[in-house]
Image (spheres, grey):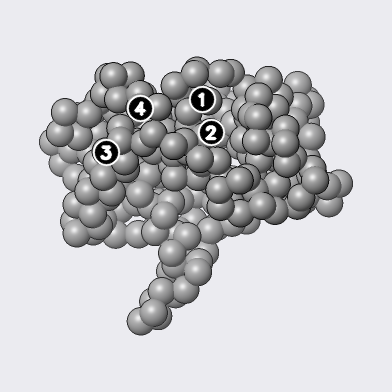
Amino acid sequence: MNYSHIIDNMLWSYSRITTFEDCHYGFLLKYIKKLKGQERKFFADYGSFMHLIIQKYLTGELKKDELVGYYLLHFRENVVGKAPTYSIFQNYFKQGIDYLKNIEFPEEEIIGVEEEVLFNLDDKNFIGFIDKISERGGVVITDNKSRDLKERTGKAKPTKSDKELDKYLRQLYIYSMAIEQKYGVLPKELEFNCFRTQKVINEPFDMDEYERTKEWALKTISDISNETEWNPNVEWFKCKYLCDVCNQCEYYQMFGDKAKSIGGDA
């Protein structure tokens, strides 16, 4: 079935577009049927909690010597989802403490923290929440990431980690549209603060990549508007630990724990 009458009036975001890329059926459940997740997920909970603490630090609500105490006091009420394994829980928990002990940002003028932005791409309306906007000899967009991204290798043939970095940079190029429309300038740098590994990755803004990201976003939205099959992509780990509507998904109910990985269409 085609839902273009609903899709044409959607408020878009990077996460909505990538949800469709990950699983067409997941997009249908979340954004067409508007199902709400019934189960908290560990990775989402952990990331949101760390974002909250970093926000409180950058806005002056918490001082550096208060961060670890706040983390320990409020961890269980914020991170409710169950980790896949004990070792994953242990690593994430300890890495959070280590990061907050050593938290450090460069000297800069902070323009916005967790700033909600509304902008448009052609006739499509978008929303985003930018973790940090700062002035450092030019505008810098920073995204706080729990994922262990790798710095670009610079090899002639992009590696797997290079391609992963480019995938996540799309989000910051999407946000660059908001910066251009709100402040009248384009960012100088795009930055990932990979807090679990205490690594900061800076990428100079690339106009060609900016235009390619716009084309990607518009093409994917067009694909969504024309979709009629809504096939699932059942991958055990992603479904169980990343998808917040998996327990309301018929395909996950059919396959679920029977297979560790079922790629492609079910």
Residue 85 versus residue 206: which sits nearer the camera?
85
| Mark found first going from the N terminus, 3 or 2 | 2
Mark 1 touches mark 3? (CB < 8 Å): no
Work out which residue is located at the far right of the displayed protein and give it.
86
Mark 4 touches mark 2? (CB < 8 Å): no
Residue at 44% x, 67% y: name it.
Answer: 162
Residue at 51% x, 30% y: name it.
Answer: 55
Residue 215 versus residue 264: which sits nearer the camera?
264
| Mark found first going from the N terminus, 1 or 3 | 1
Which residue is denoted by mark 4 in the rendering? Answer: 2
Q: Which amino acid does label 2 sit on?
A: Gly
Please say if 243 is above or below 60. Answer: below
Q: Which amino acid does label 1 sit on?
A: Lys
Say which of marks 4 and 3 sits in front.
4
Name the image quarter holding residue 218: top left
Which residue is denoted by mark 2 in the rendering? Answer: 26
Helix, strand or loop for disc 2: helix
Query: CA–CA distance between discs 4 and 3?
Result: 12 Å
Say which of marks 4 and 2 sits in front.
4
Helix, strand or loop for disc 1: helix
Mark 2 crowdedness (10 Å alpha carbons): few <14, some 14-19, many ≥20: many
Q: Picture coordinates of residue 149 (x, y %)?
A: 53, 58
Q: Residue 222 carries which label?
A: 3
Which residue is denoted by mark 1 in the rendering? Answer: 30
Q: Which amino acid does label 4 sit on?
A: Asn
Residue at 50% x, 45% y: name it.
Answer: 22
Figure disc tally: 4
Q: What residue type is labelled 3?
A: Ser
Mark 1 touches mark 2? (CB < 8 Å): yes
